Image: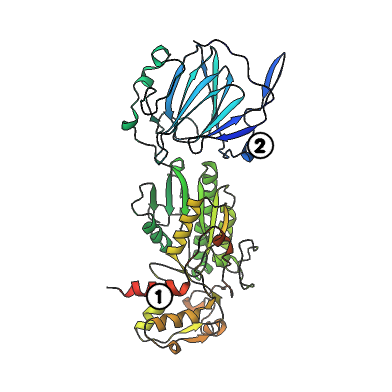
């Protein structure tokens, strides 16, 4: 067996290197020493983040002491990330990708001493063989150890991995469990952490169901299954199972939100529940996708950019703005801001189509302006942001094309359904509301609306996502609606 080797190399600069396994990073660590011994910064968040180390938020530090050279442990893939280093001695490390995907079975090996460390993502099998007596193997992990956690194992002697162990396995110190692990053809790959869609039966939820159809890693929760208006909506949710949560749930009754009961419900769903969700997503390193609204603005500018200060007018907009603020505290977040949403179920376009088909000539507001946003495009934009790993932050998403008034859109609907555009009578919002009171006599009060709701799209387009024109999507929607 190899004898003791000189200590770690002194004076190497901190550096990182990619490896044959995606996400596995090898680090050179600066070690400072003299006649008394040596010192190193084993893990340094700020410097290592700058070199590509994920901000993996370790919560537990484990040390494996190995008395004899030739001690061999692994190959174990755990459902958490690890930052591995050697405190004393040297090891031959071997890592095999056991995650589902094209890199399944990829192998990387390296010798680690005190001047080297490696980051191993969730699902990559970890093994090592000590090259010196009295070796201490240390690792930071970002989840608390649990005997019930789902592990994936591979036999140390797997012929496909074909790891060239410095000390043959028949002469190595090994446990019986490690000797009996399955070979690669029998290994069930570790699936990625799942995606959870909240509000799965809403307009956007239905579009997300279509875009994720058949994907076993995506789960859907309806209001019946997870009611965000409840006092503790996430009490029974195991957040460790999820890598992404898409919050498509919202209280959207804009006028009802101005009532006493509606105000409480709007704040419970749109603000308080989002704040609780943000805490859990931060603690479990979950990517949060949260849906925002043009109602977080007062509409005083013609085109809203992502960095415009929030200025909501009514209770609905105020509760949504509060939810946006909470969602933005999650380190990995996408706030997807939309306007004038059209999808399955009740919406403005469906209402206008019904009036056109019944021969009714409506009065429609002509001094509020924006663009329609079709839920299939919101769903596609969400998938695009997640798949491309776009920088986290807020993104406006709507259909492209010219800005229109509600009356313009209603006239488009009538024309596409074979009715004259003149059937739609455009009126100012003040005139439209003149016949309504402010809530007396059993009527709901009318919430204030932003005059301008159009969203600037340059930021999302810079990531490579281009939504089709609203006119195209409107024609497709109406054709689909009338299809037998």
N-terminal label among 2 and 1: 2
224 lies above or below 188: below
Q: Position of residue 226 (x, y in %)?
A: 41, 52
Q: Position of residue 121 (x, y in %)?
A: 49, 36
Here the colouring is rainbow
Distance (Cα) linking label 2 and label 1:
53 Å
Question: Residue 475 — which label?
Answer: 1
- Residue 271 in sight: no
Callout 2 secondary element: helix
- Identify the residue position indicated by label 2 in the image: 47
Q: Nearer the viewer, residue 18 or 65?
A: 18
> Residue at 40% of width from left, 77% of height from top?
351
**The quadrant where residue 359 appears:** bottom left
Callout 1 secondary element: helix
Q: Position of residue 455 (x, y in %)?
A: 57, 68
Residue farthest to the left?
Answer: 484
280 lies above or below 272: above
Q: Residues within 10 Å of mark 1 (few under 14, many from 20)?
A: some
Q: Nearer the viewer, residue 330 or 82?
A: 82
Q: Position of residue 184 (x, y in %)?
A: 34, 30
Question: In the rendered image, which quarter contains the C terminus?
Answer: bottom left
- Residue 8 in sight: yes
Is residue 355 shown left or right of residue 26? left
Q: Residues within 10 Å of mark 2 (few under 14, many from 20)?
A: few
349 lies above or below 153: below
41 lies above or below 425: above
> Residue at 43% of width from left, 14% of height from top?
172
Q: Nearer the viewer, residue 404 or 157?
A: 157
Question: Residue 331 — which label?
Answer: none
């Amino acid at each position: 067996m190899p004898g003791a080797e000189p200590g770690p190399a002194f004076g190497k600069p901190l550096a990182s290197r990619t490896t044959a396994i995606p996400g596995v990073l090898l680090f050179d660590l600066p070690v400072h020493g003299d006649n008394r011994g040596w010192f190193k910064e084993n893990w340094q968040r700020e410097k290592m983040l700058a070199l590509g180390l994920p901000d993996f938020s370790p919560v537990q530090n484990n040390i494996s002491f190995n008395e004899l050279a030739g001690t061999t442990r692994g190959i174990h893939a755990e459902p958490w990330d690890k930052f591995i280093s050697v405190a004393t001695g040297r090891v031959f490390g071997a890592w095999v990708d056991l995650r589902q995907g094209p890199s399944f079975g990829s192998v990387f090996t390296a010798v680690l001493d005190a001047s080297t460390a490696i980051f191993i993502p969730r699902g990559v099998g970890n093994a090592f063989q000590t090259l010196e007596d009295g070796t201490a193997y240390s690792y930071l992990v970002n989840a608390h150890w649990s005997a019930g956690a789902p592990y994936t194992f591979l036999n140390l002697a797997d012929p496909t991995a074909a790891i060239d162990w410095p000390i043959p396995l028949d002469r190595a110190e090994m446990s019986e469990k490690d000797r009996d692990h399955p070979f690669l053809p029998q290994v069930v790959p570790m699936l990625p952490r799942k995606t959870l869609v909240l509000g799965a039966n809403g307009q956007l939820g239905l579009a997300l169901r279509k875009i994720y159809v058949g994907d076993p890693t995506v789960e859907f929760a309806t209001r019946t299954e997870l009611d965000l208006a409840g006092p503790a909506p996430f009490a029974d949710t195991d957040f460790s199972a999820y890598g992404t949560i898409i919050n498509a749930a919202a209280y959207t009754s804009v006028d009802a939100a101005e009532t006493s009961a509606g105000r409480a419900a709007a704040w419970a769903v749109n603000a308080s529940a989002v704040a609780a969700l943000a805490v859990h997503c931060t603690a479990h390193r979950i990517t949060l996708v949260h849906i925002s609204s043009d109602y977080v603005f007062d509409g005083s500018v013609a085109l809203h950019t992502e960095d415009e200060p929030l200025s909501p007018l009514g209770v609905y907009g105020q509760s949504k703005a509060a939810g946006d603020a909470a969602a933005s505290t999650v380190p990995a977040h996408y706030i997807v801001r939309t306007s004038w949403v059209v999808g399955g179920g009740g919406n403005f376009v469906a209402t206008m189509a019904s009036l056109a088909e019944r021969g009714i000539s409506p009065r429609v507001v002509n001094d509020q302006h924006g663009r329609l946003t079709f839920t299939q495009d919101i769903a596609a934009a969400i998938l695009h942001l997640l798949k491309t790993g776009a920088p986290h932050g807020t993104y406006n998403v709507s259909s492209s094309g010219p800005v229109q008034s509600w009356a313009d859109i209603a006239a488009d609907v009538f024309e596409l359904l074979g009715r004259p555009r003149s059937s739609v009578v455009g009126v100012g919002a003040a005139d439209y509301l003149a016949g309504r009171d402010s809530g007396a006599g059993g009527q709901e009060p009318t919430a204030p609306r932003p005059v301008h709701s159009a969203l600037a799209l340059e930021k999302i387009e810079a990531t490579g996502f281009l939504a089709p024109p609203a006119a195209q999507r409107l024609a497709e929607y109406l054709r689909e609606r009338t299809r037998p």
